[in-house]
Structures are given as C-alpha cells and as structure tokens.
Amino acid sequence: MKKLKKITVDETMPHQIDSPDFKDTNMKMKRPFVNDFGVVIGDSQYSSANSPLEQWSDEIDPAIMSGEEWVHPTNDIGWNTRENRELIESKKKPNAFPFMHPTKDVNHGKD
C-alpha cells in the first residue's frame, strides 16, 4: 500500500485556519489513512470517488458512514471548534516551564 502524504507542519495544519496547534501537547499528528471502503480519511480533501457520499442513492443506509473508520484522530473537522481547540491547547506546558510548578505558585508571598 502506498504511504499517504504527510499534510502537517510542526504538529500544525497551516492550511486550516481554525485548526488547533498540537505542538507541545504530547499528542502527535497522525497521517491520513485509507478505510475499508478505500476512502482516504484525514487528507483535508473531503471528497473521494470511493465514498458512499459520491454514489448516494435511496438504497444506501447512512449508518454505513458511521464509526471510527470515518474519523481521523487529529484531522477531523471537530478539532476546529473553539471548545476542542481549547481542549488540546490546554495540554501545553506553561511558557515558564520548566521553572515553575505546574499547580503551585511557589512565588506567592515572596515579594
């Protein structure tokens, strides 16, 4: 099987303006993958000749397009919402790392 092209730059997707920055979050961007239907998931193209959406008819059950094989772990449109961007970006260490305690203000009362 052909290796799919990497579409990220330094744990970001600059081609998507609202995409979160995964850098320094301990979550690594994943490459696109091909699901059991031969559809590339996570390439930001959103259209595939093999997709049931491209061959839709009254006989196609919409449930055929549900499940994990239709969702990319790091390049899904859901990451572009404000809530999900905040969720992933909250995993970053503070800018003062490693010189501050992650939960205690050790400077409190020192000035």
Image (cartoon, grey):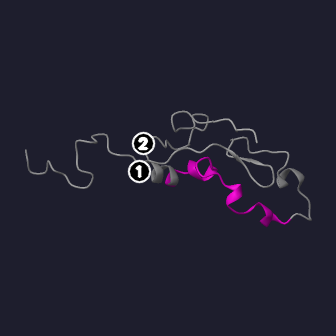
Viewed as shown, does residue 43 lie left or right of 38? left
Badge 2 amino acid? Asp
Q: Residue furthest front?
A: 1
Q: Residue at x 23, y 50 (%)?
A: 101
In the rendered structure, find residue 29 and report the number of the disc placed on it.
none
| Residue 67 located within the stretch drawn in magenta | yes
Image quadrant in which you'd find residue 18: top right
- x and y, in percent, of residue 56 in the image: 88, 56
For mark 1, give the secondary structure: loop
Q: Residue at x 67, y 44 (%)?
A: 32
Above or below residue 6? Residue 41 is: below
Instruction: Please state which of residues 6 and 76 is positioned toward the viewer in this rendering.
Output: 6
Q: Quadrant of the N terminus?
A: top right
Residue that numbered label 1 is attached to: 91
Viewed as shown, does residue 36 lie left or right of 9? right
- x and y, in percent, of residue 27 in the image: 49, 48
Q: Dot 2, how many residues are within 10 Å of its Cα: few (below 14), some (14-19), or many (20+)?
A: some
Q: Quadrant of the C terminus?
A: top left
Q: Residue at x 47, y 50 (%)?
A: 88
For mark 2, give the secondary structure: loop
Q: Mark 1 to mark 2: distance in Å?
A: 8 Å
- x and y, in percent, of residue 25 in the image: 43, 46
Viewed as shown, does residue 94 lie left or right of 78? left
Q: What is the magenta range? A: 61-83
